[in-house]
Image (cartoon, grey):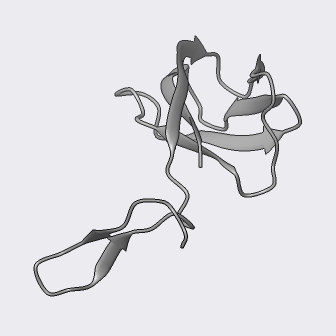
């Protein structure tokens, strides 16, 4: 007999199973970038392998910011014509 937890919804569909992966909150980073600049932010263990995620809730001026994941870091880039604020949440998936 296997051990674990399963959660069903009201219609009998499995919503959570032992084989499912759940996310965990790791950290949040905020700052401001000058126009055309980038910033590398270190996060221990971060990898671009589908097991990590970034959530950007941009500041009012941050409509030109882009994110990219690397090994043990992510990069925030401001491609806009003016300074831009950013707020990035990091999750393990």
The quadrant in which residue 59 appears is top left
Front residue (pair 80, 16): 16
Task: Write the residue at 55% across / 19% down.
Answer: 83
Above-or-below relation of 65 to 4: above
Relative to residue 4, is residue 70 depicted above or below? above
The quadrant where residue 74 appears = top right
- View extreme (left): residue: 10
Q: What residue is rendered at 57% in x and 67% in y? A: 19
- Spot occupied by residue 61 in the image (x, y as percentages of width and height): 42, 27
Tell me: residue 14, above or below residue 78.
below
| Foreground residue among 56 and 35 | 56
Q: Residue furthest top?
A: 31
Say how many tags the image has. Answer: 0
Instruction: Give the x, y percent position of residue 77.
Output: 70, 33
Residue at 72% of width from left, 58% of height from top? 50
Which residue appears farthest toward the right when viewing the image?
Answer: 71
- Image quarter in which the N terminus is found: bottom right
Horizontally, residue 4 falls left or right of residue 32, namely left
Left or right placement of residue 52 versus residue 6 in this view: right
The quarter holding residue 38 reads top right
Give me the residue at 80% from left, 28% from top: 73
Instruction: Report whether 29 appears left or right of 52.
Output: left
Q: Position of residue 52 (x, y in %)?
A: 67, 46
Left or right: 47 in relation to 92: right
């Amino acid at each position: 007999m296997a051990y674990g937890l399963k959660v069903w919804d009201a219609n009998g569909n499995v919503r959570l199973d032992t084989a499912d992966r759940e996310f965990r909150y790791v950290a949040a980073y905020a700052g401001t970038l000058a126009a055309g600049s980038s910033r590398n932010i270190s996060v221990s263990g971060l990898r671009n392998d589908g097991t990590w995620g970034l959530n950007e809730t941009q500041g009012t001026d941050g409509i030109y910011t882009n994110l990219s994941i690397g090994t043990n870091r992510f990069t925030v880039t401001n491609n806009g014509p003016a300074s831009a604020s950013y707020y990035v949440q990091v999750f393990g998936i």
